[in-house]
Amino acid sequence: MQLIDGKAIAAEIKKEIAKEIEEIVNAGGKTPHLAAILVGHDGGSETYVAHKVKACGECGFKSTLIRFEDDITEEELLNEVERLNNDDDVDGFIVQLPLPKHISEQRVIEAIDYKKDVDGFHPINVGRMSIGLPCFVSATPAGIIELLKRYNIDTQGKSCVVLGRSNIVGKPVATLMMQKGNPGNATVTVCHSRSENLKEICKGADIIIAALGSPEFVTADMVKDGAVIVDVGTTRVPSDKTKSGFKLTGDVKFDEVADKCSYITPVPGGVGPMTIVSLMKNTLLAGKKCIY
Ligand code: GUN
């Protein structure tokens, strides 16, 4: 079994980006600027946004964190989105999800100028991705594809099972895995909470991408010998062994599955760091006005 070291690959990519930014800035070009809106104080969101801001610094980007309390109205948030759409210094921005229940996430996503939508959540970016046009691809699926590419994992003609059908991970990663390309060209099955024979379907997979948000769901009896396992789960499970009082837990029962597979991503240190770095890559593209 080989461990897929997302942390190391992410560090490599950040160095590549920082080098390119140095060249751009030395040549008189603009420093890419990412803004992030964070509503409320959800622990997970606080951590993710802090990592995104830190990564901007490592890449040589400018970043702005805009915070609101969770009693902000939808109208106030939409006004802020509009302000960022019109701010020429901001190349790209994200609104960290989830949002409080009284705000429609879809309305907010659709209010973002798709040319600044570095999360790749706007329907124009989702639609363009699904037909293979240049666009901002959402960060987690892009990070998974990059890991498979950097580890030279052959996906062509392979049976790939995606567990989970979320708009952020399951659906887009299934689209990318089935698309013409390398990585890609896989035969993809998407399983979800209503799927029947899920264990049997997984057992036949050459590649499993687990994105259910269900801690340790994938057990050894569901995995074929030699399969490639990509674990997208990052559930905060209470733990008395850590200072923070929780432990990030993946969707795969790592200890028993690791022995059976050819490659596996750990949690933490697998897909997570690649998600952040993919956002950095999108911000670089936004700064260079490469896509739109
Ligand atoms: N919440 C969980 N993942 C993400 C992400 O990739 N982007 C945003 N904006 N919110 C998230």
Image (cartoon, helix red, strand yellow):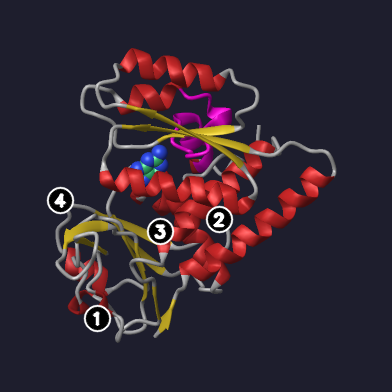
CA gap, disc 3 to disc 4? Answer: 27 Å
Other residues around mark 2 within 10 Å, as few (<14) / some (14–19) / many (≥20): few
Q: Which residue, given by chain and number where applicable, does mark 3 sit on?
A: 272
Q: Residue at x 27, y 53 (%)?
A: 164
Q: Which residue, given by chain and number where applicable, does mark 1 sit on?
A: 255
Mark 4 and mark 1 lie on one chain; the one further toward the N terminus is 4
Is 98 situated above or below 248?
above
Q: The residue tagged with tag 3: helix, strand or loop?
A: helix
Which amino acid type corresponds to the residue marked 3 in the rendered image? Gly
Q: Assign the N terminus to one quadrant of the image.
A: bottom left
CA gap, disc 1 to disc 2? Answer: 34 Å
Q: Is residue 273 left or right of residue 195?
A: right
Image location (x, y in percent) of residue 80: 45, 19
Mark 3 and mark 2 lie on one chain; the one further toward the N terminus is 2
Mark 2 sits near ligand 1, with its Cβ under 8 Å away:
no
Labels 1 & 2 near each other (Cβ < 8 A) = no
Mark 1 and mark 3 lie on one chain; the one further toward the N terminus is 1
Q: Residue at x 60, y 21 (%)?
A: 87
Residue 194: mark: 4
Q: Quadrant of ligand 1?
A: top left
Q: Residue at x 33, y 37 (%)?
A: 97
Q: Residue at x 70, y 39 (%)?
A: 31
Comparing labels 1 and 2, the label whose residue is closer to the camera: 1
Other residues around mark 4 within 10 Å, as few (<14) / some (14–19) / many (≥20): few
Q: Residue furthest right?
A: 27
Q: Nearer the viewer, residue 216 or 71?
A: 71
Magenta stretch: give its range: 112-129
